[in-house]
Amino acid sequence: MTPSPRTSLPLDDDLASFSQSIADVVLASVNRGAAAASGRSTATLPASGSSLERRAAAVLGGAHPPGAMPTRAFRTPPRRLSRSVVTALDFTSPKSVVDQALEKKLVMLPSGITAALSKTEPDNLAALLGAGSPVASTTVGTAGAPALSPAPRELRLMIHRITCTQKVGFELTDWDGIDQILCGGLGWNSLVDPDTIGPGTTTSPHYRKVPQFEIGKFRKDGQAVDLRPDRAFCSWDLRLPGGWPRFFFGDIRLAERDSGQDFAAFLKLLWDQIAPQVIDLVSKIVEDAAKGAAQGASAGSVAGVGGTAASGQVWLLVAGPLAGAALGAAMGALTSWFVEDTKDDILEAADLPLTEVLMDQTSGFAGRNKTEMRTIEYVRAGSTGRYRIQYYWLLS
């Protein structure tokens, strides 16, 4: 699934290719873990205990109740894997798929971004990202707008309404024919430290795990449910220390509950395994590219993503949006992998994660404290089931 966030990087061929290559690495990692856990001689687990392969194998080895969604889904044949990526990987190597991909440069930044990383000034990067980027759109939108006073303390991603365009419909596990729609997911911002997220970690100020909740019950096509009051999907404290601008991402997931707990297992996979790996992988790729592009420049200007003010801007303006696009591609591919094997009907959306940027704490949205109402559509691929969520971003 090709990601196309509401405010994101221009979706050119290079960016689409980069996002898909991240998805290939994630899927290859999961497939290797599944193959190793199934006892196949063609795959062994890497040495690193924190690798995605070992996390996938732990799921298969009893970390979840028998019959949980990941067990069934991971045992199916691999899907959507690029042949060029698969043939370059060694599933018996002590190195993880991610480490092999980095070493063999199977995932490369778009050439324009790589060339510009030697100039880490925010203005240069903003210009590079183009008219469709969050940086450019926000900067233009707030030009001459008054600063918000007092300064907002919090940013919230708000859900206003969910509309059933087409019900999932009657199923053997759904005796009353009512669609019970569950919601949950993940929110994070560009200040997140990849080393602080993953299995065993709790939700944090920069990495917000959103457990499943019921968002509505639908008896007929065209029915809409207004959330009264509007529900905050997740929120961030803007007073916390860190550089500006800041990117914010909301990965709102929907499922129609039947008889299982598959959606909860899917969210745990997103929180603890997939998102941390994608964020960490993209940050390493950007950091390596920045170091290479800055030969001849001062080493301190690009020494470690988040390590200095300049390198922090590299992450904020480049790695943040790229991680969002890559996570959208990876989760889209994994969702497609799972939908045929789950009891709960997990819906797909091309526009995830939702993305917004604040240039500073007081700029707001063109001088206002909230965005316009926006819409994202969810479908059940190849079958009935279509829903729309109306949402907006709110400063308070």
Image: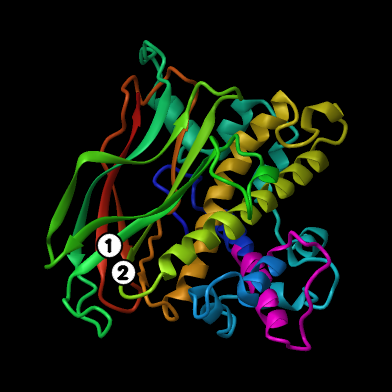
* Location of mark 2 (residue): 257
How many C-alpha atoms fall within 10 Å of the one at disc 2: few (<14), some, or many (≥20)? Answer: many
Q: Looking at the image, which residue is at 78% across and 73% down?
A: 45
**SS category of the residue bearing label 2:** loop
**What is the number of the mark on residue 283?**
none
- State left or right for residue 307 relative to residue 6: right
Residue 168 sits in which quadrant?
bottom left
Q: Looking at the image, which residue is at 48% across and 75% down?
A: 69
**SS category of the residue bearing label 1:** strand
How many C-alpha atoms fall within 10 Å of the one at disc 1: few (<14), some, or many (≥20)? Answer: many
Q: Nearer the viewer, residue 329 or 170?
A: 170
**What is the number of the mark on residue 181?**
1
Instruction: Tell me which colouring the rendered structure shows.
Output: rainbow
The quarter of the picture where the C terminus appears is top left
Magenta segment: does it hold 371?
A: no
Identify which amino acid the numbered label 1 is placed on.
Ile
The answer for how far apart the CA atoms under marks 1 and 2 are is 6 Å
Please count the marks in the image.
2
Horizontal and vertical percent for residue 242?
61, 25
- The image shows residue 161, relative to residue 371, as above or below, that is below
Check if mark 1's residue and mark 2's residue have beta carbons within 8 Å.
yes
Q: Looking at the image, which residue is at 69% across and 74% down?
A: 33
- State left or right for residue 257 relative to residue 30: left
Q: Start and end of the magenta stretch?
A: 23-52
Identify which amino acid the numbered label 2 is placed on.
Arg
Horizontal and vertical percent for residue 264?
44, 63
Upstream in sequence: badge 1 or badge 2: 1
Horizontal and vertical percent for residue 270?
53, 58
